[in-house]
Amino acid sequence: MNTTIGTLICALGGLAGAVFALPFRGIKGWKYESYWFVYAIAGLVLFPLALGLATCPDLFKVIGDADGATLARCIGFGALWGLGGLTWGLMIRYLGIGLGLAIGCGLCSATGTLIPPIATGHAADLVKDTAAVVTLASVVVSLLGIVLVGLAGKLKEGELDEEAKKKAVAEFDFKKGMIVAVFSGIASAGMNFGLQSGASLQEAAAKAGAGANWVGIPVLVVVLWGGFIVNAAWCLWQNAKNKSFGDYTRGVSAWALAALAGVVWACQFACQKIGEPAMGDMSYISFAVVMGSCVLFSSILGVILGEWKGTGAKTRGALVAGLLVLAASIGIAVVAKSL
């Protein structure tokens, strides 16, 4: 096991989560539901399935032989994530990449990391020794960094006039964005609930000959099936409601960009499941590392995209402080295993 490598792989997943929405900015003339459906096909079905077939021998047999309860939990939690995922894009539309992902990922990180050990009767593992306590501290520090980034967003709301806010984020609406972010962040924690519910699938994948770093991919495949069902149903319903099925018949570039966004998005949780085995008994913080690094990178991206342009020293100071704290939380997670 190499905790540092495992943590860095998870952090790379956070980078994927931070940049996945960038291709959407190049899509013109398509309704939201249309490009989200293409994103869902590529990111929730095709890419994970291709990765699973490439890394796990007899993938379909491994999944088919799994007990019904395990599959139901994975798919059910995936569907819960799907409800949150539907509004993830709306959250970014209303708050921007930097602020939106900071708040959404913060709530998602807290609930997704701390609830599974408690719900499975392993709450004591969170404080069982020095390494565990320091690891838990890294999660708390991460949340502090996310709070600081959120504070910067609130200060930004009060500083900029409507024209400036719309220039940085075309549909900026802090109130709507916060409502969406709270729902999306909590529901999206279903992803980690599902990923931590497939232990028997991982054991079966190992017996089938999957490498140690790839045994979690079949779990990801099944969890994302649940997410796809919810996303596809909503998108097709919106297509019918808005008469937007015609979007799919024009714009090859829109198909390519939406599919690219889906593949990049899926990489964040593929990295989590690939990095977990190297983290040993501290693997439960992998989700927090992914979410924390996602906030870190998305906040930096928000600065690059001009989402914080025109803000005052106090707002920029809160943002920088939040970024530094987030970076520190990842460092703490890296060193915790050596204690």
Image (cartoon, rainbow, N blue to C red):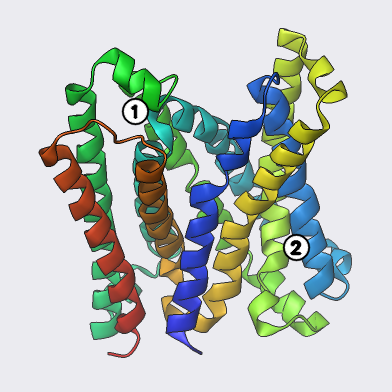
Q: Locate residue 331, reporting x and y percent.
A: 30, 74
Secondary structure state at the residue bearing disc 1:
helix
Q: Locate residue 147, reporting x and y percent.
A: 23, 46
Kind of residue at badge 1: Met
Q: Locate residue 239, reporting x and y percent.
A: 75, 17
Residue drawn 77% across and 64% down? 51
Instruction: Classify the position of the C terminus by image quarter.
Output: bottom left
In depth, the one of 205 and 249 nearer the eye is: 249
Judge whether 81 appears above or below 171 on screen. below
Residue drawn 69% across and 75% down? 215
Would residue 242 be found to the left or right of residue 297 on screen?
right
Point out the tag, 1 or 2, that comes first from the N-terminus. 2
Would residue 45 be found to the left or right of residue 119 on screen?
right
In depth, the one of 17 and 253 nearer the eye is: 253
Q: Locate residue 70: give its quadrant.
A: bottom right
- Please give the label number shown on residue 67: 2
Judge whether 142 appears above or below 130 on screen. above
Q: Are dots 1 and 2 in contact, CB under 8 Å? A: no
Residue 338 appears in the figure: yes
Query: Which residue corresponds to mark 1?
Result: 178
Q: Locate residue 143: give its quadrant.
A: bottom left
Residue drawn 62% across and 70% down? 199
Secondary structure state at the residue bearing disc 2:
loop
Would residue 146 be found to the left or right of residue 304 on screen?
left
In depth, the one of 128 and 326 nearer the eye is: 326
Q: Locate residue 297, reporting x and y percent.
A: 41, 54
Kind of residue at badge 2: Asp
Q: Compute the Cα span from label 1 to label 2.
A: 39 Å
